[in-house]
Image (tube, rainbow, N blue to C red):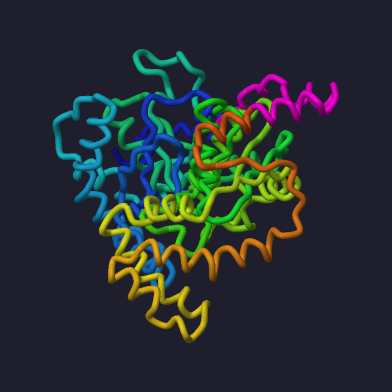
């Protein structure tokens, strides 16, 4: 497998890959890169782990590309058997016999410059040109379509797996698709659920999603955060990139008719909302949900204190709120939680912190209608009927726009 004998490296356009929906999509990046975000449905089979990737990067920048290449070459030789076995397992292939490490040695013996030249990308052949699996049936990618993915694609094709291709531009190409989709999206007529903390906006929104799933944009669900100081307790917040990928997928499915979502600030936890979403929230029709104080306490106790782990997370965050409330509350909130006086704790937080904050930020906002959120399913039914009446009364042009059929599914999302 020396100079001039490497198989071709077909690299597909990211948009085409997403349109086609390959049978298997493999992310070769490190676990940390994958955890930040990935293409939908991709399996992580890392060529290098986080520490190895960092070491190679350090050698490249502080020593030389040649030394970084030699380190990567040695690691790849040692790990190629396990990587090949995992990809084969996912694809349903049989791994051919032979010394795979030796194949890596022969493939890379000419050094980085020769390998770069020999692994020049070529366009993916049209579907159906190959026997068996179509080209692009198994797709691998790395961060930017560099040597990581091109070398593995070439290696696997050299073993006889001719359906394997890479993605031109790697994850970066997919990221550009996501950003382009969000930049271009314009929300349909929007209705925004607002109300004091604990009224159950999320509960009502998710009941509405059972009735009209095509209407709902669940930002907190996509973000893995409740959009408050304590909003991450018991949840797994998404990264900014993961949130945007999820949001782009949701937008691509279409929102025929209205868009219903919760009122948020410009951030949901650490997530910054894209401009298209913020415009929908800020310019949407405000619908306020209400509930008695004790019902709100019930909702928050159930939501935040469902497990021992959640209690520990909450205890760690309460000192921040004590500081916000003032010196007289130092140790008070933590003490109430430790004493098992959860309802008293929640009531105090609502009355002294969250309710004043909401009234300060939302007090001047015009409200189109109010709904009792005590029974989320009933509230969702009332909301649905109110929105349908509002759309019907908006006038023929607005009604037609709001009820228009969903747009054709945008390519790749």
25 sits left or right of 172 in the view: left
Give the vertical position of 46 relative to 137 (above or below): below
Q: Position of residue 25 (x, y in %)?
A: 39, 33
Q: How many marks?
A: 0
Identify the residue at image location x=38%, y=49%.
29
Which residue in the rendered view is the most extreme toward the bottom? 327
Is residue 58 covered in magenta? no
Quarter of the image for residue 86 reads top left
Between 328 and 257, the one nearer to me in the picture: 328
Between 232 and 151, the one nearer to me in the picture: 232
State the image quarter where residue 62 is shown: bottom left
Magenta stretch, residue numbers: 385-413
- Tell me which residue sits at (51%, 44%) in the image: 202
On-image quarter of the C terminus = top right
**Residue at horizontal 73 percent and vertical 26 percent from the top:** 389
**Left or right, 355 with reference to 40:** right
Residue 189 visible (yes or no): yes
x 81%, y 26%: residue: 393
Residue 172 can be seen, yes or no: no
Corner quadrant of residue 190: top right
Which sits in the foreground, 159 or 264?
264
Q: Where's the N terminus, which quadrant?
A: top left
Percent x, y of residue 105? 24, 47
Estimate the x, y position of residue 265 in percent, counting from the top left: 63, 57
- The relative height of residue 330 versus residue 94 in the rendered view (above or below) is below
Q: Where is residue 136 in the image (x, y as percent from the top left)?
A: 43, 26
User: In the picture provided, is 83 more to the left or to the right than 347?
Assistant: left
From the viewer's perspective, tell me whether residue 9 is left or right of residue 76.
right
Nearest the viewer among 44 and 128 is: 44
């Amino acid at each position: 497998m020396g100079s001039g004998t490497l198989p071709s490296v077909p690299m597909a356009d990211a948009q085409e890959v997403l349109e086609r929906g390959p049978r298997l999509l493999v992310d070769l990046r490190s676990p940390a890169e994958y955890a930040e975000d990935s293409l939908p449905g991709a399996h992580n089979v890392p060529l290098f782990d986080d520490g190895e990737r960092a070491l190679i990067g350090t050698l490249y920048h502080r020593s030389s590309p040649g030394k970084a290449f030699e380190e990567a070459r040695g690691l790849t030789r040692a790990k190629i058997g396990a990587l090949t076995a995992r990809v084969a397992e996912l694809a349903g292939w049989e791994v051919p016999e032979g010394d795979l490490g030796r194949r890596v040695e022969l493939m890379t013996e000419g050094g980085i410059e020769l390998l770069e030249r020999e692994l020049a990308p070529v366009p993916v052949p049209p579907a159906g040109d190959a026997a068996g699996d179509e080209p692009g049936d198994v797709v691998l990618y790395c961060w930017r379509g560099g040597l990581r993915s091109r070398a593995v694609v070439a290696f696997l094709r050299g073993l006889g797996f001719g359906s394997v291709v890479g993605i031109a531009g790697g994850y970066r190409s997919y990221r550009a698709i996501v950003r382009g989709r969000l930049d271009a999206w314009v929300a349909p007529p929007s209705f925004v659920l607002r109300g004091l903390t604990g009224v159950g906006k999320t509960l009502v929104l998710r009941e509405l999603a059972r009735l009209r799933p095509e209407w709902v944009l669940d930002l907190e669900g996509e973000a893995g955060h409740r959009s408050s100081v304590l909003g991450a307790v018991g949840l797994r917040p998404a990264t900014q990139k993961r949130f945007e990928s999820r949001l782009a997928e949701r937008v691509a499915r279409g929102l025929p008719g209205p868009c219903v979502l919760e009122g948020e600030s410009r951030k949901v936890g650490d997530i910054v909302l894209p401009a298209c979403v913020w415009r929908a929230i800020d310019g949407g029709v405000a619908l306020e949900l209400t509930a008695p104080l004790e019902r709100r306490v019930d909702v928050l106790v159930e939501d935040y204190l469902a497990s021992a782990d959640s209690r520990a997370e909450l205890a760690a965050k309460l000192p921040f709120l004590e500081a916000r409330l003032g010196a007289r509350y130092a140790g008070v909130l933590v003490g109430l939680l430790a004493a098992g006086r959860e309802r008293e704790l929640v009531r105090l937080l609502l009355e002294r912190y969250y309710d004043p904050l909401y009234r300060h930020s939302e007090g001047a906002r015009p409200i189109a209608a109010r709904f009792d959120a005590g029974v989320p399913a009933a509230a969702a039914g009332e909301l649905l009927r109110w929105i349908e009446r509002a759309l019907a009364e908006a006038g023929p042009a607005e009604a037609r726009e709001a009820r228009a059929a969903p747009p054709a599914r945008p390519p790749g999302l």
